[in-house]
Amino acid sequence: MKRTTDRAFPLIEDLDPPHPARPHTSSWLNQRYHHFERRLAYPQTDDPQAWRRWRRNLRQALRRTLKLPALGPVPTPEVEVLEECPCDGYRRLKIAYETLPGNWISAYLLLPPGDRPKPAVLCPHGHVQGGKQGVVDPDIAPGLAYGHALARQGCVVLAPDNAGMGERDGHTPLFDQPGGCMLAWARLNHFGLDLTGLRVFDLMAGIHLLCDRPEVDARRLGCAGLSGGCWLAQVVTALDRRIRAVILSGFFTTFAQTVWHGHCICHHPHGIGAICDMPDISALIAPRPQFVESGIDDTNYPHQPAFSLTQRAYEFLGAADRLGLDRYAGGHLFRGEESIPWLVNHLRG
């Protein structure tokens, strides 16, 4: 299927072919993009067998693209509790765990009161102040601190730092340069690994961790993420079918409208555009429930045509009522007014 190249949508680059007096490489690449097809676009049919084949093929291709096989089996990590404090309606544990030898994750585990197993939500953060802190701390969160809000609604919450971010950030001491996504991506690239892949691997280990907790009902798992956390929530939910429902906030769009213009290197798994687009990844989640948040003023991440493409996939599967959308007055933030009650409701039964 062809790419999204219709200029009726925001941020689609003009087709402006290069010529001898204007030999721009970027224009040449954009020209190629207008004629480029992704190999594993979702099937334009309601045939269940076609969807089963496509799901299997795209999951396998995504795992290869993200270099997940090279990381080995996803572990169920042992938890070290570093701190514990009471919060408004739950206990907050600061924990650490290894997913690969020496690859330590710093995370918050939020535990509501009560003895019965509860729903659990994995909450990856985006490029926000404080990394995981912005998921649980209302004072610094961009919009709603969604981990905090979900814990107050009775969900166990795991909010880990992404590789290269939060407490897992670092720098190059020889040159005293900042680390972050670029340093992590470059060093992983030397090993033939991928930054999105490592982050997804770590999140899958987090799912194992949650399923292993006595406080958690492993049949009722959700996921929620803002911005770069939306991207990670989309990918991990597509690959890990234990996740029952997901909120995707602030980065629900297409490659042509985001990473094609550069964006952060962490959203650039090598060759992913050859196999799929972002709406295909959401179609891989279907027919599981999926809720999209998109701020009207968040013009850097337009939700169309991605939402309509995903909606079409849900219609093919007879599950149009399982895809929600909140277009709110605001910018790049987690709103949560409609999405949090929606997720809690889907994880109740």
Image (spheres, helix red, strand yellow):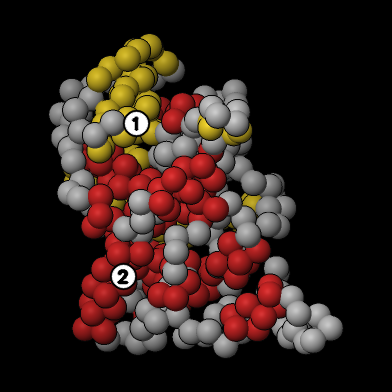
Q: In percent of the image, x 40 and y 75: which residue is there? A: 275
Disc 1 crowd rating (10 Å Cα; few below 14, some 14-19, many 20+) is: many
The quarter of the displayed image where residue 347 is located: top left
- Pick the front one: 134 or 77: 77
Are the residues flagged by discs 2 and 1 in contact, CB closer than 8 Å?
no
For label 2, the residue is: 61
- Pick the front one: 38 or 237: 38
Residue 106 higher or lower than 9, as above or below: above
Q: In percent of the image, x 78 and y 87: which residue is there? A: 19
- The amino acid sitting under disc 2 is Ala
Disc 2 crowd rating (10 Å Cα; few below 14, some 14-19, many 20+) is: some
Q: Earlier in the sequence, mark 2 or mark 1?
A: 2
Residue at the limit of the structure toward the front, as seen here? 174
The quarter of the displayed image where residue 97 is located: top left
Residue 34 higher or lower than 134, as above or below: below
Q: In percent of the image, x 39 and y 33: which residue is there? A: 160
- Pick the front one: 88 or 283: 283
Q: In percent of the image, x 59 and y 23: which residue is there? A: 139
Q: Judging from the image, what secondary structure is the residue with disc 1 in?
A: strand
Q: Is residue 253 visible?
A: yes
Q: Judging from the image, what secondary structure is the residue with disc 2 in?
A: helix
Q: Position of residue 107 (x, y in %)?
A: 37, 28
Q: Position of residue 280 (x, y in %)?
A: 42, 71
Q: Which mark is residue 105?
A: 1
- Pick the front one: 268 or 241: 268
- The amino acid sitting under disc 1 is Ile
